[in-house]
Amino acid sequence: MTAPATPTTWTPPRLGVNIDHVATLRQARRGVEPDPVWAAAAAELGGADGITVHLREDRRHIQDRDLRILRETVQVGLNLELAVEPTMLTIALQVRPDQVTLVPERREEVTTEGGLAVSPRREKVGEAVARLREAGIRVATFLDPDPSEIDASVEIGVDAIELHTGRYADAPEGQERDRELEILRAASARIASAGIGLHAGHGLNYRNVMGIAGIAGMAELNIGHAIVCRAVFVGLEKAVREMRGRIEAAR
Ligand code: PXP
């Protein structure tokens, strides 16, 4: 087990701001505003360490044009969430984000439900990881905190694993949430001991982020919905700054 977070060993995880829902709002009218490219700039001004977008096969929010412009304009790391499908991999290899996070994708889902199943498709996912890494792109897989899936991802050579925090976020505060946090802590220790990057995300908000940010070795959190929701009232730059404050308070 890794040591618990202490002021001497803990450094705040990077904050990757997911701007998909700015594009969701734009797509509600199929117009030009609000522009996720502007959102990325505002998020950077607020202290984002990275910008995350999910180019879905159905293009329900982020569009190819967004990705192209973001590649040119984003000055922090650009993390592209992507399904393991040949057409999507071709796009990633053309655009060359700094990082790709491989995610499961189902057309009927409202948002990404559950982690990627790597073990049943080890060869296909492994090939995608190898192609992306050869192109100089860091690759993460988005996983439920399941030891066998973590081991399968380590075996196929990923640079990092992003743990799905949805069950933790959905659990009522108290014993149930504590149990989910313990599961995430154990999975985090397994990932850290494999010597690869430890990321987490999904459903994190201003109230529940500290438990996850405080996990020893946590290097990156990807947060979207809660930040964009707060931005409606306080502006995106301030919403990002406030989230960074919560993460740093996990110390
Ligand atoms: N990480 C991954 C892999 C995701 O698919 C998502 C949702 O797009 C997030 C993080 C961000 O989740 P949320 O919008 O709930 O913060």
Image (tube, helix red, strand yellow):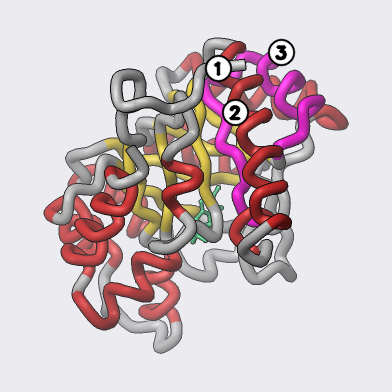
The reply to whether residue 69 is in sight is no
Which of the two labelled residues, at mark 2 and mark 1, occupies the earlier sequence position? 1
Res 188 label = 2
In the structure shown, which secondary structural element does the residue marked by tag 2 occupy?
helix
Vertical arrangement, residue 75 with respect to residue 177, above or below: above
Disc 1 target residue: 2
Give the residue drawn at x 77%, y 34%. Answer: 146
Q: Which residue is mark 3?
A: 155
The residue nearer to you, when weighing 55 against 187, is: 187
Does mark 1 have its CB less than 8 Å from ligand 1?
Answer: no
Question: Which residue is painted at 55% across and 54% down in the image?
Answer: 202
Quadrant where the image shows the N terminus: top right
In the image, farthest residue toward the bottom: 29
Residue 57 x/y as whole percent = 60, 57
| Label 3 CA crowd tier, 10 Å (few <14, some 14–19, many 20+) | few
Residue 148 highlighted magenta (yes or no): yes
Q: Quadrant of the C terminus?
A: top left
| Dot 2 or dot 3, earlier in sequence | 3
Q: Are marks 2 and 1 in contact (CB under 8 Å)?
A: yes
Q: Nearer the viewer, mark 3 or mark 1?
A: 1
Q: Position of residue 3 (x, y in %)?
A: 51, 18
Q: Secondary structure at mark 3?
A: helix
Residues at marks 2 and 3, CA–CA distance in whole angstroms? 16 Å
What's the CA distance linking mark 2 and mark 1?
Answer: 9 Å
